[in-house]
């Protein structure tokens, strides 16, 4: 039986606060095995982490993002930020085949993922009201 080849290359993931008007961003990322804790990002700041995929190719990371308590506009979103790709390479393409650096960017209208090869941000999901 042939097993799929899983990359054991280090990957770097960033969550960047590009919210306007001095707005802070709360970030909480985790996987099945690792809880990376809560992080409060000032405007323009980013939180980053590195990891390797597990042997079985089942690594999955997700993050919950929300505006800070003091922010008059209460917004949140939960999203997968890494998953193992077998049949398509959407995430791999966006993050760069060689660079393996993903930049998830919080903006006023929603969350974007940097398309590294094209040097642009692509809209992924809008904010949900409240938190």
Image (tube, rainbow, N blue to C red):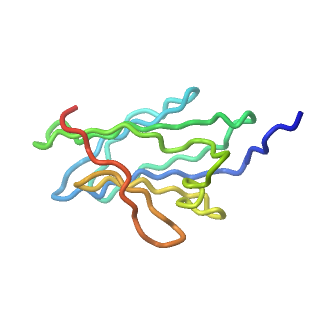
Quarter of the rendering containing residue 107: bottom left
> Which residue occupies 24% across, 54% down?
109
The single residue placed furthest to the bottom in the displayed view is 118
| Residue 126 in the image: above or below residue 54 | below
Quadrant including the N terminus: top right
Q: Where in the figure is residue 67, as x and y percent of width and height?
A: 23, 42
Residue 75 located left or right of residue 90: left
Quarter of the rendering containing residue 54: top right
Residue 28 located left or right of residue 100: left
The one of 122 and 28 positioned closer to us in this rendering: 122
Residue 10 located left or right of residue 68: right
Residue 122 located left or right of residue 108: right
> Which residue occupies 34% across, 56% down?
45
Q: Where in the figure is residue 41, as x and y percent of width and height?
A: 32, 48
Quadrant including the C terminus: top left
> Which residue occupies 41% across, 50% down?
15
Q: Where in the figure is residue 108, as x and y percent of width and height?
A: 22, 55
> Which residue occupies 63% across, 46% down?
85
Q: Where in the figure is residue 30, as x and y percent of width and height?
A: 49, 33
């Amino acid at each position: 039986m042939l097993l799929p080849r899983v990359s054991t290359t280090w990957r770097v993931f960033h969550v960047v606060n590009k919210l306007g008007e001095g707005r802070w961003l709360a970030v909480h990322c985790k996987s099945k095995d690792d809880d990376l804790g809560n992080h409060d990002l000032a405007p323009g700041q980013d939180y980053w982490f590195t990891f390797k995929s597990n042997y079985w190719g089942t690594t999955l990371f997700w993050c919950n993002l929300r505006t800070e308590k003091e922010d008059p506009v209460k917004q949140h979103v939960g999203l997968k930020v890494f998953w193992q790709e077998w049949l398509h390479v959407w995430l791999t393409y966006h993050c760069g085949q060689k660079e393996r650096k993903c930049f998830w960017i919080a903006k006023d209208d929603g969350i974007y993922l940097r398309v590294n090869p094209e040097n642009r941000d692509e809209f992924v999901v809008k904010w949900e009201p409240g938190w």
